[in-house]
Image (cartoon, helix red, strand yellow):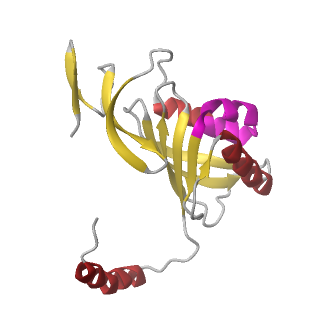
Amino acid sequence: MNRTSNSNCTTSRYRLPCQTVSHRLPRPFSYSTTSVQVSAVTNRTARTVILEYYEAYNKGDFTTLGDMFSEDVSYHDMIYEQPFVGRLQVLDYLRKVRDILTSDIKIVVEDATDGDPRRVGVMWHVESSNGAMMPFSRGCSFYTLDTEGKILQSRDLVESPVKPGSLTLNALAAVTPIFRALNLPA
């Protein structure tokens, strides 16, 4: 577990009492360990920022959404091979999704983690204005904020309409010995 120390306290990276928190800072999906100062500009947690993000998205408020992203945001919807990179590219993609969903369809946050000033995980589903849940609409998303509280990275994992079940385990069992035999680096 990463631990940091401030003059008055020592805490794990998952608690908020200290101002300095040790994190791995993502740049599009590569990691290095860096210690960061939590922004004193706002007392908002990552959870608060992301709940505001979903509220703005559901309202179709792309001005607010644009202000919430860092300039070099990386948004990886796992149904695509490559992430959308940069504020304009991410906003363009989100507008296309919003146009398909229409204004009566909402993303409903079921649960969101709390306690980390820069990272949050969210479980959600999509439903119509009458409360009916859309099929294959469950998902989870992971967000990392920069030190100014802007969204730096987002990764969405959406429920698959195909449910392969134990076929996936069988495929892993077949492929694992091949990887071991090739002795590929991790």
Residue 80 locus on image (x, y percent): 60, 63
Query: Is residue 105 in view?
Result: no
Q: Is residue 169 left or right of residue 126?
A: left
Residue 71 vertical placement versus 181 (above, below):
above
In front here: 162 or 76? 76
Q: Quadrant of the C terminus?
A: bottom left
- Residue at (28% x, 73% y) in the render: 184
Q: Tell me the residue at 21%/12% (across/down).
A: 7
Residue 158: x, y in percent? 55, 61
Asked if residue 146 can be seen in this view, the reply is yes
The magenta stretch is 53-72
Q: Residue furthest top?
A: 8
Residue 161 painted magenta: no
Examine the residues drawn in magenta and state their main secondary structure. helix
Q: Is residue 123 left or right of residue 85?
A: left
Q: Nearer the viewer, residue 115 or 155?
A: 155
Give the x, y percent position of residue 46: 47, 32
Number of marks drawn: 0
Residue at image location 71% in from the left, 42% down from the top: 88
Q: Residue at x 29, y 80 (%)?
A: 176
Q: Is residue 29 left or right of residue 62?
A: left
Residue 95 spot, x, y in % from top left: 75, 48
Q: Is residue 125 above or below residue 177?
A: above
| Camera-side residue of 59 and 184 | 184
Relative vertical location of residue 178 with respect to residue 122 in this rendering, above or below: below
Vertical relation: 25 (above or below) 30: above
> Split into 4 quadrants, where in the image is the N terminus?
top left
Q: Quadrant of residue 172?
A: bottom left
Q: Quadrant of residue 3?
A: top left
